[in-house]
Image (tube, helix red, strand yellow):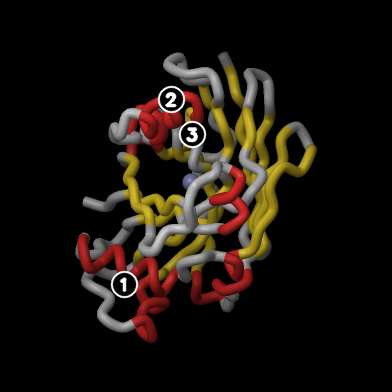
Amino acid sequence: MARIFCIGRNYAEHVRELSNVVPQKPVVFMKPMSCLVKPGEPIRFPGHGSDFQHEVEVVIRIGKPGRVERKEDALSWIDAVTVGLDLTLRDVQDELKKRGLPWEKAKAFDQSAPIGEFVSCHGGIDLKGIAFSCRVNGVERQCGSTGDMIFSFETLLVELSAIWALQRGDLVYTGTPSGVGPLAVGDTVEIHGEGIGTFSWKIVA
Ligand code: ZN
């Protein structure tokens, strides 16, 4: 069964804005597939926290099973790409981090993974320079490029698949650039990926 892998701390400016340390190895956590939300579906403000934040991320989809032994082969595992949101309850995460506890309550709750529509990688999209952004109520909050990732797609797939043999349909949320910030009831959050599309969700009570 396919899984959702998420990469933390993969853009240097975002690492700095949360006062974290640039990691030596990718930071990995997971969300269940039940967290996915299709474009346009209303997202309920979660009841177990208050600082509900957007993290726009490029999401890759795995097209074949196995372990990636060599970086040179890694991109052949990716069959499609889109943008998504790694929705995070930052107040809950800060409390869990302080106490050394797992992050699921802050990161893997229902509707925490809005996802755009996938675009095939075989249409010539340049994975190394995808520009992507996030707007809230029409105001830009985040923008980035996959060219700025600390760990490239190739490195991520080698590192992930050394631990979890990849499965067809696995998704990888590949980290967020700086500018993460709060969402409120009534907000519309819109994300865009160049060559991919624009997708939006409304936050409801
Ligand atoms: Zn994230």
**The quarter of the displayed image where residue 95 is located:** top left
Specify the amino acid type for callout 2: Val
- Give the residue pinned by disc 3: 88
Mark pair 1, 2: CA separation: 31 Å
Q: Is residue 21 left or right of residue 67?
A: right
- At 39% from the left and 64% from the top, the residue drawn is 24
- Give the residue pinned by disc 1: 158
Residue lying farthest bottom? 72
* Front residue of this view, candidates 135 and 98: 98
Residue 177 at what x, y percent from top left? Answer: 60, 53
- At 75% from the left and 32% from the top, the residue drawn is 137
Q: Secondary structure at mark 2?
A: helix
- Asked if residue 146 is positioned above or below residue 181 in the image, the reply reads below
| Mark 3 beta carbon near ligand 1 (under 8 Å) | yes
Residue 105 at what x, y percent from top left? Answer: 35, 27
| Mark 1 beta carbon near ligand 1 (under 8 Å) | no
Asked if residue 44 can be seen in this view, the reply is yes
Mark pair 3, 1: CA separation: 26 Å
Query: From the viewer's perspective, is the residue at label 2 or at label 3 nearer?
Result: 2
- Mark identifier at residue 50: none
Q: Secondary structure at mark 3?
A: strand
Residue lying farthest right? 139
- At 67% from the left and 20% from the top, the residue drawn is 186
Residue 140 at what x, y percent from top left? Answer: 76, 43
Task: Tell me whether the residue at label 1 lies in contact with that at label 2, contact meaning CB atoms closer than 8 angstroms.
Answer: no
Name the N-terminal-most of marks 1 and 2.
Answer: 2
Residue density around tag 3, few if under 14, some if 14–19, many if 20 or more, within 10 Å: many
Mark pair 2, 3: CA separation: 8 Å
Query: From the viewer's perspective, is the residue at label 1 or at label 2 nearer?
Result: 2
- Give the residue pinned by disc 2: 92
Specify the amino acid type for callout 3: Thr
